[in-house]
Image: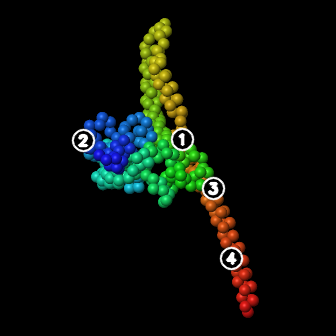
Amino acid sequence: RTRASTLLSPSSTVVPKLEPRSHRRARRWPRCELCLLERDKHSTELYGKLIYIGNTMFVHKLCAKFLPKTSEAFFDDEVDSYFFSGSMPEWLKKTIHDEIRRCRKLRCICKRIGGGMGCFNSNCSKTVHLPCAVKAGFRVSPRFPREWDFYCPNHVPKRLMEINPKRTDLREFLLANQERKSMSMKEDDLCNTDESLDDEEENVEENDKEEEVEQGQNDEEKSPGDSSQPVLNPSDMTQSKQRSDLKWTLGPKKAELMETKQKVKLLGQLVDDLKKQISSLSQDLDKAVRELAKEKSKLASALNCYS
């Protein structure tokens, strides 16, 4: 081989080729076909669980959630049981496979295949995997409740630079999303335990009344010299104490209050940004009006001279 052919030939160390189907079946742990990360504790906590889409292929929930064609289907958390049970509709599988084919034609900043996310700036042509976007320091700007704008570090707008970076950083955004989900799950569990505890307390009260009646009957049958006393069960005392502690540890709507507070803060920041933009636009309009008035006076003087 000549030197020119070796320089022009693609290097497997820089751009790895797509693995064949036989190798993918032989792999011990499944990986996401969009971000190419294998399953581990860190990836599932940050990018969601792996969802089976057929043909021994899996995708992370958040990797599919931030794609344009599948964001609506993966938005609600109620569909987790619907997707993870293996009953995914065929049209959604087809759209995910189409997105995977589209991503394989693109190349990430890490020189690997499959960069499906891109910068929202029209002049930027970067495409990245979701983990690579987290490492590169991408910023997030929620545009609508189910739509987000992603910006690379070189094209972050000024309104996002003024906000605290912890609120717009992609990694912090993903962690906050997972924390909100875990808090809502804990609140649901607490609500269910409250209902079950109320039923158990009613049953315990009824059992206590029956035991008191039985003990009174036994005391009347016994002789007055007999000084036997009823024996208390310590397990019942500990159970009732644990129920009362669980019932009053957290309120039933704590997670909802936290979410509303965060939404109110974001809305306040957006209102402040809009006020700044309106003030700058009003200043520009005032300047334009003044210039027009000057030009009008000049034209009037010129007409008077000609007349």
The image shows residue 141 at horizontal and vertical percentages of 52, 52
Circle 3 residue: 272
Labelled pair 3, 1 in contact (Cβ < 8 Å): no
Name the quadrant of the C terminus.
Answer: bottom right
The image shows residue 287 at horizontal and vertical percentages of 69, 70
Of the image marks 4 and 2, the number of the one nearer the N terminus: 2
Horizontally, residue 220 falls left or right of residue 11, namely: right
Q: Nearer the viewer, mark 1 or mark 4?
A: 4
Circle 4 residue: 292
Horizontally, residue 59 falls left or right of residue 288, namely: left
Seen at 60% across and 53% down, the residue is 269
Q: Secondary structure at mark 2?
A: helix
Decide which of 34, 226 is in the foreground and name it.
34
Q: Secondary structure at mark 3?
A: helix
Labelled pair 4, 2 in contact (Cβ < 8 Å): no
Circle 1 residue: 254
- In the current view of this chain or complex, which residue is farthest to the front? 2
Of the image marks 4 and 3, the number of the one nearer the N terminus: 3
Decide which of 218, 241 is in the foreground and name it.
241
Q: Nearer the viewer, mark 1 or mark 2?
A: 2
Of the image marks 1 and 4, the number of the one nearer the N terminus: 1
Badge 4 density bin: few <14, some 14–19, many ≥20, Cα 10 Å: few
- Cα distance between the residues tagged 2 and 3: 56 Å
Residue 297 versus residue 112 in the image, above or below: below
Of the image marks 2 and 3, the number of the one nearer the N terminus: 2
* Amino acid at the residue labelled 2: Ser
